[in-house]
Amino acid sequence: MTANSTDTRRYSDEIWIGKLSMGASNPVRVQSMTNTNTLDTEACVAQAIRIIEAGGELVRLTAQGVREAENLKHIKAELTQRGYGDTPLVADIHFNPEAAEVAAQFVEKVRINPGNFVKSIKSSSDYSDEEFEQERLLLREKFIRFLAICKQHNTAVRIGVNHGSLSERMMNRYGDTPLGMVESCMEMLRFCREVDFKHVVISLKSSNTRLMVNAVRLLVERMDAENYHFPLHLGVTEAGDGEDGRIKSAVGIGSLLVDGIGDTIRVSLSEAPENEIPVAFAILQATRSRITKTEYISCPGCGRTLFDLQSVIAQIKARTNHLTGLKIGIMGCIVNGPGEMADADYGYVGAAAGKVSLYKKQQCVEKNIPAEQAVEKLVELIKASGDWVEKE
């Protein structure tokens, strides 16, 4: 799989999660999360393997308590035994700093939620300045202790702020807003800088795509102002399943990727975790963030279409779908065809009834080919131009 186009990508520092590098000019990494009981080693291992074989580059598992965190050691050992040990595991922690400290000893990354990393010191949401600071110091103490363990074991950290679980302290000061999410994150980043902890990934997530996008854009502005360049993880929480989940994820994640923002993504679907991986790669492909397959630029067809569009697309895909990174335009007629496929490397355009013209970039190289010969002629053109590789 090829690396990202970095023409407009936000600069981020390179960090390491085990043997996996992230940020800088590395590809946007794709990950998923198991939905199995973390105490069930075999079920977790089997699901993790399905995620990895689908193309997942990180696998996250929940660790809601110390027992689950301790069992990550056995899950990691079994994956290593089966030949999957190079894929980093990520422990997902809420409400339990002790579980985070244990997990940091066994996996390559730990995700913590600032909103519930420590218990509130108050039973109400009305904070004085003194109480606000008192709770901040408690959070700092617990978090810096955790970072010391991560340093000892070369464990990376994800600071994962969720819109639905901001702390009462942040809600009281900033409201249920993108600003509250950003302030919660920046507070944690300052703690990291204080102890020179660099292997940090950040996420700001919400099920509301507009809020999520606005929060991440605001965070980038704030980080730039304070000279922070940590990698960003993108995702829409509780996106749902089927078409709705895929569209919602594409809107939220894709909006940021086209801005050049994002170093790793997860598509959160209410489905088998391995189903998330191809959707993630499709979003990366559509935003030109990471090219992992052939791209087809084809018109929807209309009354001017001069051949059976769906049949021809299927034929061309069958012959060329292994040509990673190549862009092929398939257009039904010459009215908009050459112009609309201007970004394509090669073009197949209806010229007249039963006739097809072939293009290389925007130049027509062969006109009025009989339709029954056109797909093979396209393959010959790609080969003659040096862009063909044989299927493995």
Image (tube, rainbow, N blue to C red):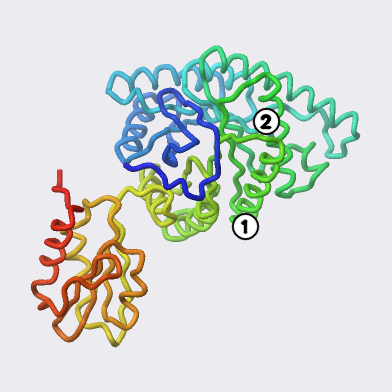
Q: Quadrant of residue 342?
A: bottom left
CA distance for labels 2 and 1: 24 Å
The residue wearing badge 1 is: 210
Element at label 2 = helix
Q: Position of residue 330 (x, y in %)?
A: 26, 70
For disc 2, the marked residue is 189
Task: State yes or no: discs 2 and 1 in contact (Cβ < 8 Å).
Answer: no
Q: Nearer the viewer, residue 122 or 225?
A: 225
Q: Is residue 275 visible?
A: yes
Query: x and y percent of residue 289 in the render?
Result: 43, 49
| Crowd class of label 2 (few under 14; some 14 to 19; many from 20; radius 10 Å) | many
The quarter in which the N terminus is drawn is top left
Q: Residue at coordinates 32% horizontally, 37% vertically from top-left?
A: 50
Question: Which quarter of the rendering shows the C terminus?
Answer: top left
Kind of residue at badge 2: Leu
In front of the other: 360 or 332: 360
Dot 1: what SS? helix
Quadrant of the image occupied by residue 111: top right
Residue 323 spot, x, y in % from top left: 23, 52
First-in-chain label (2 vs 1): 2
Using the image, determine if residue 23 lies above or below residue 252: above
The residue positioned 55% from the left and 53% from the top of the image is 259
Residue beneath the point at 36% across and 73% down: 340
Amino acid beneath label 1: Arg
Rendering coords of residue 385 (x, y %): 18, 57
Residue at 62%, 47% in the rendered image: 216
